[in-house]
Structure formats: C-alpha cells, structure tokens
Image: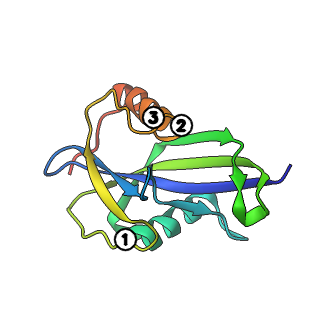
C-alpha cells in the first residue's frame, strides 16, 4: 500500500477571543495542510502549506515545540488512481500574536472557531486533534501575547 504524509498547522489566536483557524470546503472543514515535497521536514512542509493556503507568513507564527499530533488513516486518493493509501497526518500547533488577513487560495473560505471544548466539528481528524489539544492545554500554559 502506498504511504503518503500530509503536514499542517492548527493556528490559534488569543484576540479578540481564544480561537483557531479552520479552512472551509463546500461540504466540510479542513486545516491548512498538504503533502511533503522531497527534502522537506515535517515542520517545513507544515509552514509552507500554511503560508500557501492562508497567506500567514511563517515568521508571524510561533510553533509550540511541545505539541505534535499524528494520525494514520486509509483514504481513497484520486491523485493516486483512486487507490486506498496509508496516510499519515502530522499537525503542529502555531500561535499568532496579532490578527492577520487570511488569503484563501485552495478552499471556499475560512472561519475562526472559538475555543470552547468539547468540540463537535468533524468526527475524523479534527475532533481527535482538538481533544489532543485540550489535553495539551491542561498541562502546558497558554503562551502570552
């Protein structure tokens, strides 16, 4: 089975309220993420994809070195001839300290979702990520602006 890896960043802000950025497709939410290119690290891929899909420059994002979320699942991928693949998703936690304009390039739109667990957004991928973040926030202080 073909193995692929996709990396991204869940971006949080503290103002005007504690919230996180979700990208919107016509029928579901997503995160800024994408496939690794040759020679990239996971974090390099995540930051490049975030910048490409949101317009948020990497230098505006403070990555939490204590958080890395990984999930494996088995989707059918049209780009690989509609074959089922083993996909590894890696998500980093990033913080922005000021409100920045979002320049959507690959999605129908975006939405800042207020942090108010428990979240019921998307059963697979997003909900488990948010549960992992809740556990992380219970043991790590939120960064100051």
The answer to whether mark 1 and mark 2 are in CB contact below 8 A is: no
- Left or right: residue 37 versus residue 92 is right
Crowdedness of circle 3 by 10 Å Cα count: few (<14), some, many (20+)?
Answer: some
Residue pictured at 52% horizontal, 56% vertical:
8
Q: Where is residue 55? Give x, y as percent.
A: 37, 73
The answer to whether mark 3 and mark 2 are in CB contact below 8 A is: yes
Instruction: Give the structural element (helix, strand or loop) at label 3.
Output: helix
* Residue with the mark numbered 2: 124
Residue 10 has which mark? Answer: none
* Residue with the mark numbered 1: 104
Q: How many marks?
A: 3
Residue pictured at 42% horizontal, 26% vertical:
135
Residue pictured at 68% horizontal, 55% vertical:
5
The answer to whether mark 1 and mark 3 are in CB contact below 8 A is: no
User: Residue farthest to the front?
Assistant: 27
Question: Label 3 vs label 2: CA separation?
Answer: 6 Å
Crowdedness of circle 2 by 10 Å Cα count: few (<14), some, many (20+)?
Answer: few
Instruction: Give the structural element (helix, strand or loop) at label 2.
Output: loop
Q: Earlier in the sequence, mark 1 or mark 3?
A: 1
Q: Earlier in the sequence, mark 1 or mark 2?
A: 1
The answer to which quarter of the image holds residue 62 is bottom left
Residue pictured at 52% horizontal, 59% vertical:
33
User: Residue farthest to the left?
Assistant: 16
* Residue with the mark numbered 3: 127
Q: Where is residue 28? Give x, y as percent.
A: 44, 50
Question: Label 1 vs label 2: CA separation?
Answer: 23 Å
Instruction: Give the structural element (helix, strand or loop) at label 1.
Output: loop
- Left or right: residue 50 versus residue 62 is right
């Amino acid at each position: 089975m073909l193995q692929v890896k996709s990396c991204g960043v869940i971006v949080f802000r503290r103002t005007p309220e504690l919230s996180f950025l979700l990208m919107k497709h016509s029928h579901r939410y997503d995160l800024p993420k994408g496939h690794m290119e040759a020679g990239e690290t996971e974090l390099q891929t995540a930051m490049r994809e975030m910048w490409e899909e949101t317009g948020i420059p990497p230098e505006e994002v403070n990555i939490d070195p204590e958080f890395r979320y990984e999930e494996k699942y088995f989707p059918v991928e049209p780009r690989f001839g509609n074959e089922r693949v083993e996909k590894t998703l890696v998500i980093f936690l990033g913080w922005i300290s000021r409100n920045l304009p979002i320049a959507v390039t690959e999605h129908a739109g975006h939405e800042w979702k207020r942090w108010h667990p428990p979240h019921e957004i998307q059963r697979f991928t997003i909900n488990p990520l948010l549960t992992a973040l809740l556990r992380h926030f219970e043991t790590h202080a939120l960064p100051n602006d």
